[in-house]
Image (cartoon, rainbow, N blue to C red):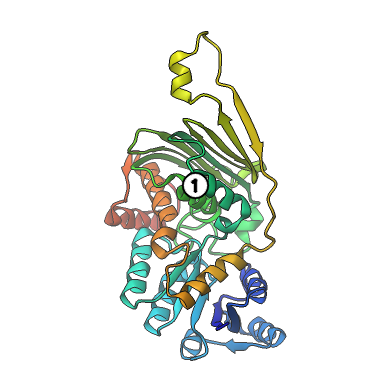
Amino acid sequence: MEQIGLAIIGSTGAIGDRHIEAIKQLTTCSLVGVNARKQAPLEKQAARLRVKAYFTLPDVLNDPDVDAIVIATPHPSHKEIALESFKAGKHVLVEKPIGVTPSEADVIVSAARKYNLKLSVLFNNRFRSESLKMKGLMDSGAIGEIYRATVCSGMFRTQDYYNQLPWRGTWGLEGGGALLNQGIHAIDLFVSLVGLPDSVFGQMRTLKHDIEVEDYASALLEYSDGFLATLNCDTVQAPPRQRMEIYGERGAIIADDWNISLHHLETPLQEFMNNAQGMFVSPKTTEEKFVLEEIENTHAPAIDDFCRAILENRDPMITGEEGSKAQELVAAITLSSCTGERVSLPVNRDDYDDLMDDLMKSGKLP
């Protein structure tokens, strides 16, 4: 099989080894070289892997053996690297989130289309067996028309986590906290299952950490067909827990820390509600639990899909447009929280960019 030559930008960072180990598992690609800001660790890494060490971005982009770039740097640098890569004729797989703001995402997506190159956003949780099962159940109509949903991404981070790297927890260098960085995986999966809302009302707090950005956020999401959803993301919860619930006329799908269950109503909800006798009776349900194979490194199928998209000249599973949706929702919640008003999606780009400028200057939530 023809292989896609990959180069990793930010290879010595926290996520670099995950990419490297994933690429080793694949037949659709090979690692040509690595690039990182700190050159001594880069040289050691390249020697260990027996690949090229690129000391500058132009070194990477000028190498004809490199077909595609994997961007594994902090997201404030994504836009510049992606644009330069597209100009050099390289496809781009970028770690989440695609950028700091929806405006940045728009520019990156437009550049990919302009140069007719592949762009994908690495939301690897979508490639988990549990996520694929949930998506299959939703697409099959297993629970019928949705009327309520909720997602909670309760995580925990120490103050030391933020202190170790100067960009963490700042508006100027990170652009967000519990929503944009930690909770965005859960938000992306949620949006992939139920779609983007029409409007949101959000509240954010810097509750327990000494940081500029939010460590706690909640939002009410309103959809065009009338159903409501709730969202909570934080980095202050102990014990941490991930939970998603989607309720429909014929049942519910619940993911509790990746334990997936399908709850099937013997009688559709509205029919039972209209016809049942008794004040406190509930519809009978059957529960089905799923034992699913765990994928040890979900970066592997994500990178594989991206490379196959290049080889097969098709869109990747998560295009730039698709990978920008979670960021759109994060921006709407942030704008709503800071203005105290309900915000419609898509967000007004000028309003959000102005807000980010204000937050960078003040260094705190309003």
Answer left or right for 140 relative to 299: left
| Quadrant (top left, top right, bottom left, bottom right) of the N terminus | bottom right
**Residue at 50% across, 36% down:** 143
Answer left or right for 34 relative to 170: right
Vertical placement of 95 versus 348: above or below?
below
| Quadrant (top left, top right, bottom left, bottom right) of the C terminus | top left
Which residue in the rendered view is the most extreme toward the top?
Answer: 278
Q: 288 or 7: nearer the eye?
A: 288
Answer left or right for 130 relative to 200: right
Q: Is residue 212 visible?
A: no
**Residue at 35% across, 58% down:** 357
| Kind of residue sitting beneath label 1 | Phe
Residue 42 lies in what quarter of the image?
A: bottom right
**Residue at 48% across, 36% down:** 149
Q: 264 or 70: nearer the eye?
A: 264
Residue 289 in the image: x percent, y percent? 67, 39
Answer left or right for 155 relative to 202: right
Q: Dot 1: within a 10 Å radius of its alpha carbon, few (fewer than 14), some, or many (20 or more) residues?
A: many
- Dot 1 falls on a residue whose secondary structure is helix
Residue 268 in the image: x percent, y percent? 48, 26
Residue 74 in the image: x percent, y percent? 52, 67
Vertical placement of 349 versus 216: above or below?
below
Vertical placement of 312 versus 350: above or below?
below
Count of numbered tags: 1
**Residue at 31% across, 56% down:** 354
Q: Which residue is mark 1?
A: 190
Residue 88 in the image: x percent, y percent? 40, 85
